[in-house]
Amino acid sequence: MNEPQENVLPLSKKEILPKNKLDRGLFLLMTVGVPALAIWETVILFRYHSELDLFSCSLIVFEVILLMNVLGNLFYLKHVDSSGKHKKLPSVLRPNWSYCHFCQMNSPPRAYHCPICDECILKRDQHCMFAGCCVGFYNHRYYLMSVIYIMIGSLCAAIFQWPHCLESIGGFHLLPILSMAAPHIAVLFGFLSIYGFICTITQIILLAVFILTSYLLIVQIQCIFTGQTIHEKRAGITVYDLGWKKNFLQVLGKKWYM
């Protein structure tokens, strides 16, 4: 795998905001929501842990590190170019290659045209709506690491917030716990305060994000170790399997530990 600097597009060549409305909304939700949750955890909830014990301080430092890694990997995921537009591809159609009438170029095997990005993506895995771009050969690593860091961060945030969330809804009793299943109804009937409602919604979001990213990570691990993309897994294509070690290095590179 090439170094990311060789494939990073300048901001002037690639729009920061996605063209698709759904992608744009989810991208803004990601770029605004992740820092907002980090501020909520490290600034607002920090007052609840007033004793400043080692666990609280260590968890906050860890979450700040996770936030930096999430935003850094999202940046590279979006701006490392996995399309064939800026690559020197042959003008003669080679065996097993295909011609893309939209891009007007020859595409290698495993490359597919994305109707949303409107370009052919090398070893296209999927279109990530939260980043507003496709996951391909050169930026697959950053998608995987984003999923891992978001999964770990959401779990840590949920653990850190849980005691405060439990206190804000009235303790560990039947009615408050049932209120967490439908907080919008509980707040209308006065079983939850506005602040308790905010804490409950935040806790639900964190748990939902953890479950979603855990599922995505399991799917990615299965595909990576079998040398498949999402499309190839669904179609049962296994001809690109090089063995788990080479498959692993193809996605994460030789410096996988960084």
Image (tube, helix red, strand yellow):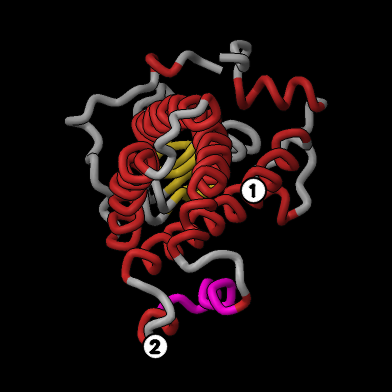
Distance from Cα at disc 1 to Cα at disc 2: 34 Å
Q: Which numbered disc, 1 or 2, marks the residue that appears first in the sequence?
A: 2
| Residue at x 31% of width, y 46% of height | 36
Q: Which residue is mark 2?
A: 189
> Which residue is located at x 70 percent, y 35 percent?
224
In the rendering, at what x and y percent does residue 130 appear? 40, 50
At 33% across and 62% down in the image, what residue appears?
Answer: 22
- Residue 8 picture location, percent across and down: 34, 23
- The answer to whether residue 83 shows anywhere in this view is no
Residue 193 rendering spot, x and y as whole percentages: 35, 72
Q: Which residues are magenta?
A: 175-184
Camera-side residue of 228 and 237: 228
Can residue 99 be seen in the rendering of this structure?
Answer: yes
The N terminus is located in which quarter?
top right
Q: Secondary structure at mark 2?
A: loop
Task: Tell me the number on the disc at residue 116.
Answer: none
> Which label is found at residue 214?
1
Name the element at disc 1: helix
Q: Position of residue 30 (x, y in %)?
A: 36, 48
What is the chief secondary structure element of the magenta stretch? helix
Is 165 included in the stretch rendered in magenta?
no
Tell me the kind of residue under disc 2: Phe
User: What's the amino acid at mark 1?
Assistant: Ser
Q: Based on the displayed image, in which of its 4 quarters is residue 183 positioned?
A: bottom left
Residue 177: in magenta span: yes
